[in-house]
Image (cartoon, helix red, strand yellow):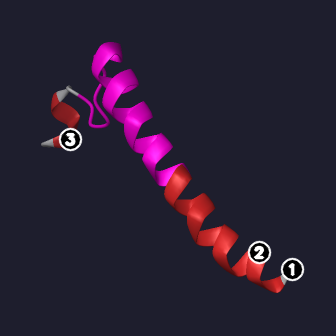
Amino acid sequence: MFWVVLFGLPIAAIGVIVALAAYQASGVQQDGRDDAPDDDSSTG
């Protein structure tokens, strides 16, 4: 059981990272929104 957890956690983490990367690459581009606001308040 210890080995299952030891090897399962990094594999699950890699899977989550790849899934999030694919989601960000596909969803955010189609959504057209950025993380930073487009207003002038950020520069001021």
Distance CA(mark 2)–CA(mark 1)? 5 Å
Camera-nearest residue between 42 and 4: 4
User: Sequence order check: which comes first, mark 1 or mark 3?
Assistant: 1
Distance CA(mark 3)–CA(mark 2)? 47 Å
Say which residue label 3 marks.
42
**Kind of residue at disc 3:** Ser
The reply to whether discs 2 and 1 touch (Cβ–Cβ < 8 Å) is yes
Counting the numbered discs, the total is 3
**Which residues lie in the magenta part?**
16-37
Residue 16, how many percent across, how many down? 55, 51
Q: Quick check: 14 above or below 42?
A: below
Say which residue label 2 marks.
4
Task: Using the image, tell me which numbered label, if any, was put on residue 18.
Answer: none
Residue drawn at (35%, 24%) of the image? 26
Residue 14, how many percent across, how many down? 50, 59
Residue 21, how many percent across, how many down? 39, 43
Camera-nearest residue between 28 and 1: 1
Disc 2 crowd rating (10 Å Cα; few below 14, some 14-19, many 20+) is few
Q: Quick check: 30 above or below 12?
A: above
Say which residue label 1 marks.
1
Camera-nearest residue between 41 and 36: 36
